[in-house]
């Protein structure tokens, strides 16, 4: 019935909040690995949460991925967003068009009536190329906006899957395995203690920026992401988690 089901998600939310020192946790029912309705619920919860925390003049940075694409699909207007900026957290031409951060930023901006700025550069670069591009005047303007984001909303992925999606080299994959990489967020790979063990050079938000971004919201669900979510949360850098029962149950009870 409805009551025990609500109770379970709320209880899981409280436990996650306490365990990882988060200010807010939302757990939607079901497991997005298997359930399309749960996927929609997760997207809607992410979209509603984001809309709730927007304020005039804020800068919102978003990542790519299927989860954030879902959030972009669900978000509705409702705030005065004329002087809100939505930007990709990092350059992101590495994925399918629908799941690129820039595309998602533009979609969210259009839906809420905000402005957006894009970074037309790939998300995986050689370190020397990234350094050279950062000096470009047009790029550095956008990067300045991105790095002064007030709100960051991002996905989390399993380390192995993300390494594959980002086309890492066999040597890099080997390194990640040897160092027990569990989760990935914003091109950073985290081990089970939340330590960053590997980073893909890119342009945009860097881990040092985390300390001055007021609200960091991770949106990730599915029991298959439990270990990844836990790894990223252990870094102690997040404020808010929006997840599902499948992931929450596995993180809290191990199944
Ligand atoms: C990426 C984010 O775009 O989405 C990553 O930059 C995240 O940090 C990934 O791991 C998750 O993707 P998905 O498709 O599982 O939502």
Image (tube, rainbow, N blue to C red):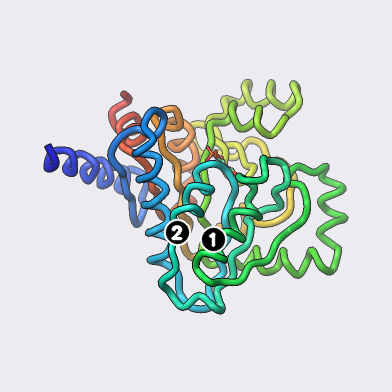
Picture coordinates of residue 246, whole percent (x, y): 33, 32
Q: CA distance from mark 1 to mark 2?
A: 7 Å
Q: Residues within 10 Å of mark 2 (few under 14, many from 20)?
A: many
Give me the residue at 72% from left, 66% from top: 142
Q: Nearer the viewer, residue 93 or 144?
A: 93
Q: Nearer the viewer, residue 189 or 60?
A: 60
Disc 2 marks which residue?
A: 75
Mark toward the start of the polypeptide (1 vs 2) = 2
Q: In which quarter of the view is residue 47 placed?
A: bottom left
Q: Which residue shows up at 73% across the image and 46% down it?
A: 93
User: Residue at image x 57%, y 25%?
Assistant: 180
Query: Front-most of 10 and 97?
Result: 97
Q: Position of residue 71 (x, y in %)?
A: 47, 51
Q: Secondary structure at mark 2?
A: loop
| The N terminus - image quarter | top left
Quadrant location of residue 118?
A: bottom right
Can residue 28 be seen here? The reply is yes
The yes-or-no answer for disc 2 within 8 Å of ligand 1 is no
Structural crowding at the residue carrying mark 1, measured as other residues with C-alpha within 10 Å and reported as few (<14), some (14–19) or many (≥20): many
Q: Nearer the viewer, residue 48 or 223?
A: 48
Q: Taking 235 as reference, is 123 left or right?
A: right
Res 212 visible: no
Element type where label 1 sits in the image: helix
- Name the residue tied to disc 1: 108
Up/down of 14 relative to 165, above or below: below
Instruction: State yes or no: discs 1 and 2 in contact (Cβ < 8 Å).
Output: yes
Residue 143 location (% of width, % of height): 72, 63
User: Which image quarter: residue 86?
Assistant: bottom right
Q: Position of residue 159 (x, y in %)?
A: 57, 31
């Amino acid at each position: 019935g409805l009551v025990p089901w609500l109770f379970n998600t709320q209880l899981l939310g409280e436990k996650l909040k306490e365990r990882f020192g988060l200010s807010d946790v939302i757990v939607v029912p079901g497991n997005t690995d298997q359930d399309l309705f749960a996927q929609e619920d997760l997207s809607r919860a992410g979209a509603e949460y984001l809309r709730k925390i927007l304020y005039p003049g804020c800068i919102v940075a978003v990542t790519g991925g299927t989860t954030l694409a879902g959030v972009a699909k669900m978000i509705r207007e409702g705030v005065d967003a004329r002087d809100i900026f939505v930007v990709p957290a990092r350059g992101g031409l590495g994925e399918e068009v629908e799941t690129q951060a820039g595309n998602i930023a533009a979609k969210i901006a259009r839906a809420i009536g905000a402005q957006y700025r894009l970074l037309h550069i790939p998300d995986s670069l050689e370190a020397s190329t990234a350094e050279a591009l950062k000096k470009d005047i047009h790029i550095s303007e956008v990067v300045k906006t991105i790095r002064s984001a007030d709100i960051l909303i991002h996905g989390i992925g399993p380390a192995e899957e993300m390494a594959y999606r980002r086309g890492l080299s066999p040597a890099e994959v080997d390194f990640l395995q040897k160092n027990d990489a569990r989760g990935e967020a914003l091109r950073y790979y985290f081990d089970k203690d939340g330590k960053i063990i590997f980073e893909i050079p890119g342009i945009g938000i860097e881990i040092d920026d985390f300390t001055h971004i007021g609200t960091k919201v991770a949106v990730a669900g599915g029991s298959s992401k439990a270990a990844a979510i836990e790894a990223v949360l252990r870094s102690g850098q997040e404020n808010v988690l929006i997840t599902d029962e499948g992931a929450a149950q596995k993180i809290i009870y191990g199944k």
